[in-house]
Image: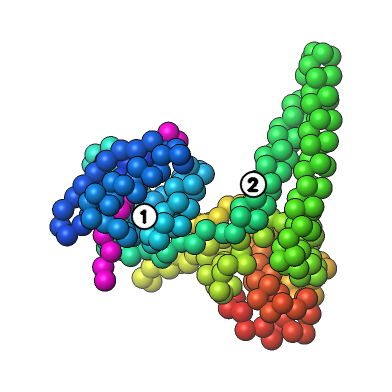
Amino acid sequence: MTLPKLGIDIAKETYQVVLLREGKKHSHAFRNDPSQFAELAAWLVKHHASQVHACMEATGRYWEDLAIFLHHAGHVVSVVNPARIHDYAKSKLARNKTDELDAALIADFCATQNPDAWTPPPPEVRELQALVHHLEALQQMRTQENNRLASNVPSEQVCNMLQEHLTFIDQQIADLKGRIQEHINQHPGLKQQRDLLTSIPGIADVTAAKLLGENIQAFSSGRSLAAYAGLSPRKGDSGTSVHRKSKLCKVGNSNLRKALYFPAICAMRFNPIIAKLSERLAQRNKHKMVIVGAAMRKLLCLALGVLKSGMPFNPSHAEKSQVAT
């Protein structure tokens, strides 16, 4: 049975929907407030759409509560990268942009492209993700304040305030790292997965928490996970004259890429699997950043391998792993 398509253009305070059902189009705007999501459910029933395939963009975090509500209500939900909708609009030669037109475009995308269904992560993973993202924000804030302090500010008062702020941020970071590990230890599943990940040379507690917070454990193959993280190589060959160097596509989850960069640098020295990979690529005169990208991808695949097998990292087993890389 083909489900009616529901395109949702989401914003901070409101969202616009367009329902495509039996050749007819219905549109309406709602407040983006969880206490009022029942209004959307009633509107769908009114238009004889008891179950729909809803599609929305992953815009900030504004989409999450509505997507979870629709999933729990029994609807099929797809959450897609905004770049896909943007390029789809270009392919349709869309010249105008309003909330209703955007919602209609998303509904049409859903009808023609049939995007994969999305499943919300467990509550403990969502909580872990929020904690980890806040840690990253604090670390970025610390870097910014430290740079200001190092810029030779002429005011002694400002320097003192910056130093006080840095001390406060350091306390917050230390406290938050403790909360993250406490949260993981309170959930046996997360604790087991954290222990498996930290058995891999190059992955420590914080990196393990970041990987689990991005829900990598939900992926079925290393290939799909690497694509999600934007770590797949992008080739640039065309005809006989265009032969560009391969590079990372970087179309994917930037949080994962940031989480893997320094661990991959460490793994290139201390992880026997990744060290051998790096050596082979260096012997082929690959650029340093190409080697780092390959190490990031391999480290991510090793992480998924131990999570799927339930066995700690073992170099001899990892070399024989059937997880797609």
| In the image: residue 11, left or right of residue 261 | left
Q: Residue at x 79, y 26 (%)?
A: 165
Q: Residue at x 38, y 36 (%)?
A: 31
Question: Relative to the observer, which residue lies in front, 319 or 206?
Answer: 206
Q: Secondary structure at mark 2?
A: helix
| Amino acid of disc 2 | Ala
Residue carrying label 2: 130
Q: Pinpoint residue 147: horizontal percent, then vertical percent.
A: 75, 31
Residue 303 shows in the view: yes
Question: Relative to the observer, which residue lies in front, 45 or 179?
Answer: 45
| Amino acid of disc 1 | Cys
- The image quarter in which residue 121 lies: bottom right
**Which residues lie in the magenta part?**
1-13
Q: Is 11 inside the magenta-drawn segment?
A: yes
Residue carrying label 1: 55
For the C terminus, the quadrant is bottom right
Q: Residue at x 16, y 53 (%)?
A: 24
Q: Residue at x 38, y 59 (%)?
A: 75
Distance from Cα at disc 1 to Cα at disc 2? 23 Å
Q: Is 82 inside the magenta-drawn segment?
A: no
In this picture, is 21 found above or below 237? above
Earlier-in-chain disc, 1 versus 2:
1
Q: Pinpoint residue 102: horizontal percent, then vertical percent.
A: 30, 44
Question: Relative to the observer, which residue lies in front, 127 or 149?
Answer: 127
In this picture, is 165 found above or below 292? above
Q: Pinpoint residue 319: horizontal percent, then vertical percent.
A: 71, 83
| In the image: residue 112, left or right of residue 324 | left
In this picture, is 117 found above or below 183? below
| In the image: residue 166, left or right of residue 128 | right
